[in-house]
Image (cartoon, grey):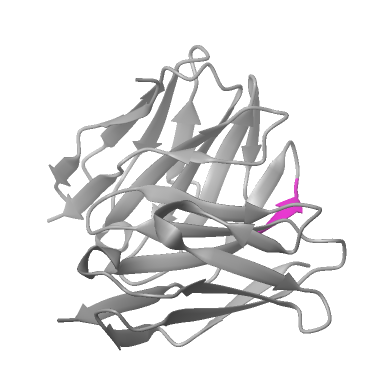
């Protein structure tokens, strides 16, 4: 089945230790999104790619970076995780002419 | 700027009772509106969406929502709650941003179903 896959599902890192979360998709969608969702809060958009074009939200901390080496894969890099970065990170994809975003299952990040 | 308000962070209903989750939006353009459901430790799944046309929209799992422009509302309903409906529900509005369209989500409503 076509889908959005996120690995790992659970990630534990130490304060200040870089971590990378990955997202892959078999939908061949050209738009990919990264959201941060803290406990009992709405998902908050961090950035998105429209094809290869990277779009950063104005309030996304510099600590967060992203890479999209090809259509299928997108990575979220957190350079120096703080305790406040503990959250669920959601990846979503969309095809240009479709209004629906398809979400992956998320990666829950714990920072010790 | 678009925004979404979900009234009630937590709603409890008895199994078999009506489910009503409220969503009001503000939008400077005709809105595209969405309801997503999120089960614990999972991603979001689209329940239904309104873009244009019929204002009563039917979705999966027996849910429906009605777009009321005069009330700027898009409330989610289900005639008879099932235990499996216990989850968190997010209303969202589409808006255009740099690069591509984006969703602005409400803060979510957690639905509990009492046996």
Residue A55 sits in quarter: top right
Q: Quadrant of the C terminus of chain B?
A: bottom left
Left or right position of A48 against B55: left
Q: Residue at horizontal 63%, vertical 19%?
A: A52
Closest to the observer: A89 or B28?
A: B28
Closest to the observer: B12 or A46?
A: B12
Q: Residue at horizontal 52%, vertical 48%?
A: A46
Magenta stretch: includes residue A97 = no
A41 above or below A58?
A: below
Residue B77 lies, in percent from the top left, at 50, 74
Residue A96 lies, in percent from the top left, at 70, 28
Residue B47 lies, in percent from the top left, at 48, 54
Closest to the observer: B40 or B112?
A: B112
Q: In which quarter of the image is the N terminus of chain B?
A: bottom right
Q: Can residue B94 be seen in this view?
A: yes
Residue A84 sits in quarter: bottom left
Q: Can residue A60 be seen in this view?
A: no
For the magenta stretch, what is the residue range? B93-97
């Amino acid at each position: 089945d076509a889908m959005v896959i996120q690995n790992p599902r659970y990630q534990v890192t130490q304060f200040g230790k870089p971590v990378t979360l990955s997202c892959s998709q078999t939908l061949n969608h050209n738009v990919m999104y990264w959201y941060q969702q803290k406990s009992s809060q709405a998902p908050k958009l961090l950035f998105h790619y429209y094809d290869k074009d990277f779009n950063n939200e104005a309030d996304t901390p510099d600590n967060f970076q992203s890479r999209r080496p090809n259509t299928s894969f997108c990575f979220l890099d957190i350079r120096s995780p703080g305790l406040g970065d503990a959250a669920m990170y959601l990846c979503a994809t969309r095809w240009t002419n479709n209004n629906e975003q398809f979400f992956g299952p998320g990666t829950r990040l714990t920072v010790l | 700027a678009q925004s979404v308000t979900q009234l009630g962070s937590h709603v409890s209903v008895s199994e078999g009772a009506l489910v009503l989750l409220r969503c009001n939006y503000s939008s400077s353009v005709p809105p595209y509106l969405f309801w997503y459901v999120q089960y614990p430790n999972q991603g979001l799944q689209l329940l239904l969406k309104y873009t244009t046309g019929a204002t009563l929209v039917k979705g999966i799992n027996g849910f429906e929502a009605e777009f009321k422009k005069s009330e700027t509302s898009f409330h989610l309903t289900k005639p008879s709650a099932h235990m499996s409906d216990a989850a968190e529900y997010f209303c969202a509005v589409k808006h255009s941003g740099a690069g591509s369209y984006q969703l602005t989500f409400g803060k979510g409503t957690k639905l509990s179903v009492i046996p």
